[in-house]
Every structure is written in structure tokens, then in C-alpha cells.
Image (tube, rainbow, N blue to C red):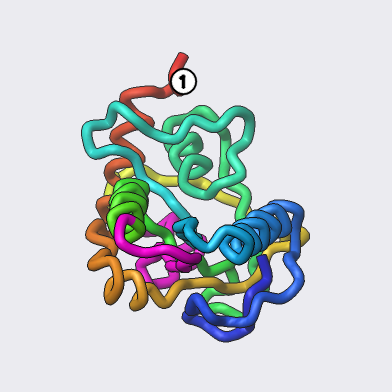
Amino acid sequence: MRLTSSVPISENCPIGVPTNPYGMSKLMVERILQDLVVAEADFSVALLRYFNPIGAHESGLIGENPSGIPNNLLPYVTQVAIGKLAQLSVFGSDYPTVDGTGVRDYIHVVDLVKGHLAALDYLKGAVGCHVWNLGTGQGYSVLQIIEAFEKATGVSVPYKLVERRAGDIAECWSNPAKAKDELGWEAGYGLEDMMRHSWKWQKGNPEGFE
């Protein structure tokens, strides 16, 4: 979804025209829920704006298992690292970022779960529609993610630079201050944790959940 050219992104930043169908679907759902609380004032609604969930449960028992070539970066990285895929395609190397690759805010999936629980607790005592960013407030480029994975695991990830994907933006990361202030929530896992937990799951499940 195209939000603004200014980062970090807060909950009240202007929402422009979504750049892809996925972004449009999220915007439509938000508008439906916002209309709902206007029509039914006793409803309690949380709009949780995820940034880029990655990682796996630290036990290694639960992880991300996409079919085909993953659309999300980290499962793509781990499948290349385990040998399931030959190499990683890095989409775009000419963005106005630190190294030319896209920058995103990556959040551990367990932190995301904790954010949901904190929002549910908040809604027990509040009606209306409430919006919170769930992110770390830190952006990392694709090449920085590859480097972090290799450092955390000791496994090399071959990659190639290819053309940009339609609809992708250069950079996007959150301002999560509102969630911290109102929910008492903030991300606890660091980037190295996200890399290690994803790799632990992939090593234990080289063919996914088969």
C-alpha cells in the first residue's frame, strides 16, 4: 500500500492509492471496519498495521511454509540456504536506499502475536476504532537481511540482482510509538533472533510440513 514518501510511518500518515491488489484489499477492509463503528457505536475494533512479519517459533516447531517460490523474503532466503532453491532473486538494485535494494521493517512473528494479545486486552475497556502500527521502527535492506542471515547461521546465500517488481516501493518502516504508549507493547526480538529462528525451523523441516 502506498502510504507516504516520509518514513518512519505513523498511524495518521496520509493513505494514498495502493500500488497493488493486496494493498487495496487491506485498505478496503479498514474502511469497512471504520464504517462499522460509525453505524454501530458499541463495537470495539483494532486495525493492526503489520509491517513485515518474519521468523518462526523459537522451538523450531512452527514456521512459514509457502508453496512454490516464496513471495516473502526470509522463507526465500532459507529455502535457498537449505538447497531447495538454487538462488535468491533480489528485485531491484537501483532504489534510492543505502545499497539500492528495498528497505522494510521486519518484525518477529511472535512479537506480532503479542501485539494482537495486547490489542485485545485494550479493547476490553474501549469502544470505537483504534489503529496501531506493529513494527520495530527499524528498516533493513534486502542485502542487509542476506548479510544478517549469513552472519547468524554461517550459511552462504547465493543471489542475483534482477529488475524491480511492479508495485514495490523503495522503503517502508514504522513508527511504533503509539502501540508502546497505549498498549504497552514493543518488539522484543532482534534481527539475529529472526534469522536464527527461521533457520532452525527450515533445517528441521527441509521439505516444509510434508
The image quadrant that residue 28 belongs to is: bottom right
Q: Position of residue 143 (x, y in %)?
A: 49, 62
Residue at horizontal 45 percent and vertical 23 percent from the top: 208
Q: Nearer the viewer, residue 135 or 89?
A: 135
Q: Is residue 184 left or right of residue 145?
A: left
Disc 1 marks which residue?
Answer: 207
Mark 1, Cα crowd under 10 Å, few <14 / some 14-19 / many 20+, is few
- Toward the bottom, the furthest residue is 6
Does the magenta-highlighted stretch encompass residue 35? no
**Residue type at the position of mark 1:** Glu
Left-right relation of 90 to 118: right
Q: Nearer the viewer, residue 101 or 118?
A: 118
Which residues, given as a range, are shown in magenta? 124-148
Does residue 206 appear in the picture of this structure? yes
Q: Is residue 150 visible?
A: no
> Which quadrant holds the N terminus?
bottom right
User: Please, what secondary structure does the residue beneath circle 1 have?
Assistant: loop
Residue in the picture at 45% in, 35% down:
64
Image coords of residue 189 (percent x, y)? 25, 57
Up/down of 54 relative to 42, above or below: above
Residue nearer the viewer, 133 or 2: 133
Instruction: Say if the magenta span includes residue 133.
Output: yes
| x and y, in percent, of residue 173 in the image | 48, 72
Query: In the rendered picture of this protein, how many numbered marks are placed on residues?
Result: 1
Residue located 23% across and 67% down the image: 184
* Residue occupying the far top of the picture: 210
Q: Residue at x 63, y 61 (%)?
A: 39
Relative side of 81 to 97, left or right: left
Q: Nearer the viewer, residue 8 or 41?
A: 41
